[in-house]
């Protein structure tokens, strides 16, 4: 079992930051993903935005695993 401090850290990141990041990334992802058909160069940006959408999942997984942010 890891340090419970990391649980609290990831919980705060999850609750206060990750939803904002995911909503903002989802908005731009819809636009960029549709334009990716025309402009293939946007595939890297759409991948980055997809990671932003998945950020709450990453935070929750790290919270449940008591993962250090540096690990």
Image (cartoon, rainbow, N blue to C red):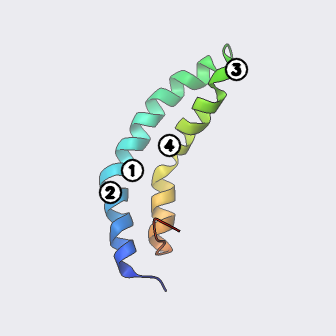
Identified at 37% across, 47% down, the residue is 19
Q: How many marks?
A: 4
Gap in angstroms between the C-alphas marked 1 and 2: 7 Å
Report helix, strand or loop for mark 2.
helix
Tell me the tag on residue 56: none
Identify the residue position indicated by label 2 in the image. Answer: 15
**Proximity of marks 1 and 3: CB atoms separated by less than 8 Å:** no
Identify the residue position indicated by label 3 in the image. Answer: 40
**Proximity of marks 4 and 1: CB atoms separated by less than 8 Å:** no
Identify the residue position indicated by label 4 in the image. Answer: 53
Which numbered disc, 3 or 4, marks the residue that appears first in the sequence?
3
Q: Residues within 10 Å of mark 2 (few under 14, many from 20)?
A: few
Which numbered disc, 1 or 3, marks the residue that appears first in the sequence?
1
Which numbered disc, 4 or 1, marks the residue that appears first in the sequence?
1
Q: Position of residue 21 (x, y in %)?
A: 40, 42
Image-quadrant location for residue 23: top left
């Amino acid at each position: 079992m890891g340090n419970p401090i990391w649980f609290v850290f990831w919980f705060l990141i999850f609750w206060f930051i990750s939803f904002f990041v995911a909503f903002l990334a989802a908005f731009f992802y819809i636009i960029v993903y549709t334009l990716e058909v025309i402009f293939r160069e946007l595939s890297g940006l759409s991948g980055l935005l997809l990671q932003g959408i998945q950020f709450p999942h990453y935070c929750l997984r790290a919270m449940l695993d008591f993962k250090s942010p540096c690990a």
